[in-house]
Image: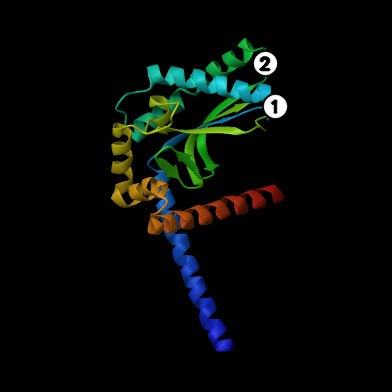
Amino acid sequence: MAYFLSAATKFLLVVLVICMIYSGSTQKQIADSVVRLHIVANSDSPQDQALKLKVRDAILEHMQVKYPNGATREEAANYLKNSLPEIKQIASNVLLENGSHEAVNARYGVFPFPTKEYGNVALPAGMYEAVRVELGSAEGKNWWCVMFPPLCVADANTLKMDENAQNELKQGLGAGNYGLVTDITDKSNVPVKVKFRIVELVESTRIKLAQMISNLF
């Protein structure tokens, strides 16, 4: 019995290591192919949540005019980094126009994201490069989207990638990982669902552990 338990433990450890390696490499490839947008409301009050959406609308309206069409991921990322003062000013103007004097912070970096579905695409939990716009205390519910490929820039209402955006994502991910983030919406595709849930579970656990450790210091 002891030998059996030892063998079973070793087998489970091997499976766990394989899952972690697969999850890490898959999520990194997905993360390296997108840039996201994250707007955090001051609080969960109806007023602050409404302001968050007005800020979203103003930023996306600006991006629909200024966003560089046909940009590569690197070009889009550089454009967004250079646009942070404009993004901050747009958000501040919206708050002032609506009687709020809360501070605004806009920064570009790598941030934790939960699993999110965007119409015909689902991105697993993990760390992603993003523009993060923080309104006031930034303690309210978030609004999330994808800036590259230009999902919310092209269609902020339905949040569905058009054909050009899908092709850009497919080129960045490769056919296998592209199938992982698109075929997950097909509930009958069990193999893809299993792979996606492995990535989702491992990366969500990593984020939670990192947050727990951060809170200790």
In 3D space, how far apart are the residues under numbered discs 2 and 1 (Cα atoms)?
13 Å
Tally the numbered discs: 2
Residue 29 position (above or below residue 106): below
User: Residue 65 appears at what percent x and percent y?
Assistant: 38, 16
User: Going by the picture, which residue comes out furthest to the front?
Assistant: 188
Say whether disc 2 or disc 1 marks the residue closer to the N-terminus: 1
- Image quarter where the N terminus lies is bottom right
Numbered disc 1: secondary structure: loop
Which residue bears the numbered disc 2?
100
User: Going by the picture, which residue comes out furthest to the top?
Assistant: 97
Tell me whether circle 2 and circle 1 mark residues in contact (CB < 8 Å). Answer: no
User: Residue 11 appears at what percent x and percent y?
Assistant: 48, 76
User: Residue 52 appears at what percent x and percent y?
Assistant: 59, 24
Taking the image as drawn, is residue 127 in sight? yes
Identify which residue is drawn at 48% across, 66% down: 17
Which residue bears the numbered disc 1?
45
